[in-house]
Amino acid sequence: MSALAVFGYGSLASPASASLSLGRAVEPAGLARLEGWQRRWTTFRNNLEAEKTFALADGAMPSFVVGLNIERVAGCEGANGALIEITEAEAERLDLREIRYDRIDVTADVRALTEGEPLADFERVVVYAAKARQHAPQAPAGAIVIAEYVRTVESAFAELGAGQLERYRRTTDPTPLTPVEATLVGDLIPEGNPRGW
């Protein structure tokens, strides 16, 4: 049994994205679902004050950027995702990447995708859920969803295997906004948090 894994339900499900953050090659240790947890577009950041700022094609600066979150929803199927084996030190490194999220223990909620399927065995599994101050049940006025982020997440789930993208879509609330192309125009991101969105 391995000690620790993070459940990647969004961009962390992408081995390329996780590898950039961890500074090593990453391959999922297995697939799983979080029983009673649903993906929602309820994390936001102030685009004018965050460590990364984006502009639209016409140069306009959107006020907010909305991203994926995971929330407890009684009776739901449970979001699918990738289990990535990490060390305690790597968990701290991921905390830098997931600065708008709290790392919480979800070991008791990890299930095989389908009953009877094998499941990677970890002593502890954590997930990143939005901090209260970064949580918005409704997208704030002037918010956008970055198209590159959507493409990265959907590509990651397509690469996880047959049926995973379809399951991702089924266990994710609809995008509240039409994704738009946006260009990075300000980057003050701390070391250890490489992202393109």
Image: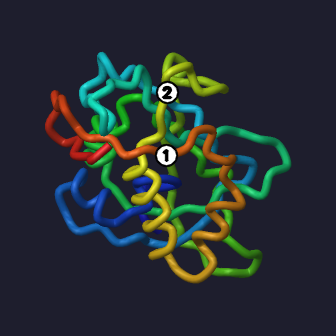
On the image, numbered disc 1 is attached to which residue?
A: 179
Nearer to us in this view, 153 or 108: 153
Nearer to us in this view, 82 or 16: 16
Identify the mark at residue 136; answer none if there is no mark: none
Residue 33 rendering spot, x and y as whole percentages: 64, 61
View extreme (front): residue = 58
Q: Residue at x 35, y 72 (%)?
A: 27
| 158 horizontally vs 138: left or right | left
Nearer to us in this view, 179 or 190: 179
| 168 horizontally vs 99: left or right | right
- Against 53, residue 41 (above or below) is below
- Against 12, residue 191 (above or below) is above
Q: Quadrant of residue 79?
A: bottom right
Q: CA distance from mark 2 to mark 1?
A: 10 Å
Q: Secondary structure at mark 2?
A: strand
Residue type at mark 2 is Ala
The tag earlier along the polypeptide, 2 or 1, is 2
Q: Residue at x 56, y 24 (%)?
A: 135
On the image, numbered disc 2 is attached to which residue?
A: 143
